[in-house]
């Protein structure tokens, strides 16, 4: 989009990647995945984040401007689960299954793990 | 304050991401803001997998279930007058409950309409764009859908974009 002459600003929970991959302008939020602008129904919080993003859009001195916003997300431990889907995504389910199968294969190949030593 | 980008991830996945080598060296594209924000026309882009469920097909989630390494790279247009009850969410990697309750959490159309009324932005474009963010391979975005969306934005006179990867 920037190459088409359109200015952009990103709001991301992973500012690490905005920095590592080189975003033109970004703000980082300490919000869980799926919630870049904050809580559902919280107009004021959403407007604060948008206001900061527009300020960075206006004032960024040059490419690679990434600002970390100070807004907190309460109840971190619960939300570490809450943001995730009820069912694991297909790739997570597949990788978990592969890890399980590998562990099982190692157990069968290595008698010391099965019988507790030869 | 520095945000830990990996704080929401399970330990093993967080460790994997932290260990990835930093890329870089490529010049960052840069379009200076062409005019004051109060005169800019805005479009919004998200990767939350939103779609107009009364009008458009969902994203191809069955295709992803068949091949877990693939994610549907197409996009859906969300009009500026979209109502919450028209919005569906097709994304297998996040809990969709809050997006189904309030799309502004990822695609803040209603907030930007308020900014338009208040004169704090020039205007909100007619069309906004929703992708489904699980992509192991970005080439279809880079080669086809990204340029296509940028061209549609140019047709609608867009000056600036707010992007919200989820």
Image: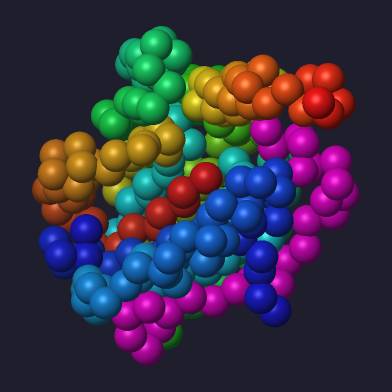
Q: Is residue A73 shown in magenta?
A: yes
Instruction: Using the image, determine if residue B123 lies above or below residue A98.
Output: below
Q: Mark yes or no: residue B152 visible.
A: no
How many marks are shown on the rendered structure?
0
Which quadrant holds the N terminus of chain A? bottom left
Which quadrant holds the C terminus of chain A? top right
From the viewer's side, name the closer residue of B93 and B53.
B93
Q: Quadrant of residue A19?
A: bottom left
Q: Residue at x 37, y 37 (%)?
A: B135
Q: Residue at x 42, y 79 (%)?
A: A65
Residue B89, given in percent of the width and then of the height, sits at: 51, 24
From the viewer's side, name the closer residue of A24 and A42.
A24
Q: Quadrant of residue B24?
A: bottom left
Q: Residue at x 57, y 61 (%)?
A: B18
Instruction: Using the image, determine if residue B33 lies above or below residue B51.
Output: below
Q: Quadrant of residue B36?
A: bottom left
Q: Is residue A108 shown in magenta?
A: no
Is A71 positioned to the left or the right of B127 in the image?
Answer: right
From the viewer's side, name the closer residue of B58 and A86.
A86
The color scheme shown is rainbow
Q: Residue at x 37, y 17 (%)?
A: B67
Residue B152, given in percent of the width and then of the height, sits at: 16, 44
* Range of magenta residues: A60-84
Which residue reaches farthest front?
A118
Residue B132, given in percent of the width and then of the height, sits at: 40, 33
Which residue reaches farthest bottom?
A61
Q: Mark yes or no: residue B66 visible.
A: yes
Instruction: Using the image, determine if residue B99 lies above or below residue B107.
Output: above
Residue A70, given in percent of the width and then of the height, sits at: 71, 72
């Amino acid at each position: 989009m920037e190459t088409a002459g359109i200015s952009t600003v990103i709001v991301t929970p992973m500012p690490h990647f905005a920095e590592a991959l080189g975003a033109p302008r970004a703000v980082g939020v300490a919000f869980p995945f799926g919630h870049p602008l904050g809580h559902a129904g919280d107009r004021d919080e959403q407007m604060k984040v948008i206001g900061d993003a527009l300020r960075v859009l206006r004032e960024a001195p040059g490419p690679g401007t990434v600002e970390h916003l100070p807004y907190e997300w309460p109840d971190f431990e619960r939300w570490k689960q809450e943001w995730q889907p009820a069912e694991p995504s297909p790739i997570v389910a597949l990788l978990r299954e592969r890890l399980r199968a590998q562990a099982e294969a190692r157990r069968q190949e290595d008698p010391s793990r099965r019988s507790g030593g030869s | 304050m520095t945000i830990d980008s990996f704080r929401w991830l399970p330990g093993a996945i967080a460790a994997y991401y932290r260990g990835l080598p930093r890329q870089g060296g490529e010049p960052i594209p840069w379009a200076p803001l062409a005019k004051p924000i109060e005169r800019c026309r805005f479009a919004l882009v998200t990767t939350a997998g939103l779609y107009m469920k009364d009008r458009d097909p969902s994203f191809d989630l069955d295709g992803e279930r068949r091949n877990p390494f693939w994610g549907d790279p197409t996009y859906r247009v969300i009009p500026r007058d979209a109502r919450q009850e028209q919005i569906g969410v097709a994304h297998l990697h996040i809990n969709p409950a809050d997006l189904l309750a309030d799309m502004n959490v990822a695609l803040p159309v209603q907030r930007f309409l308020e900014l338009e009324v208040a004169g704090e932005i020039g205007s909100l474009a007619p069309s906004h764009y929703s992708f489904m963010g699980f992509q192991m391979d970005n080439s279809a975005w880079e080669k086809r859908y990204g340029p296509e969306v940028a061209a549609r934005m140019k047709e609608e006179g867009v000056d600036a974009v707010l992007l919200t990867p989820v």
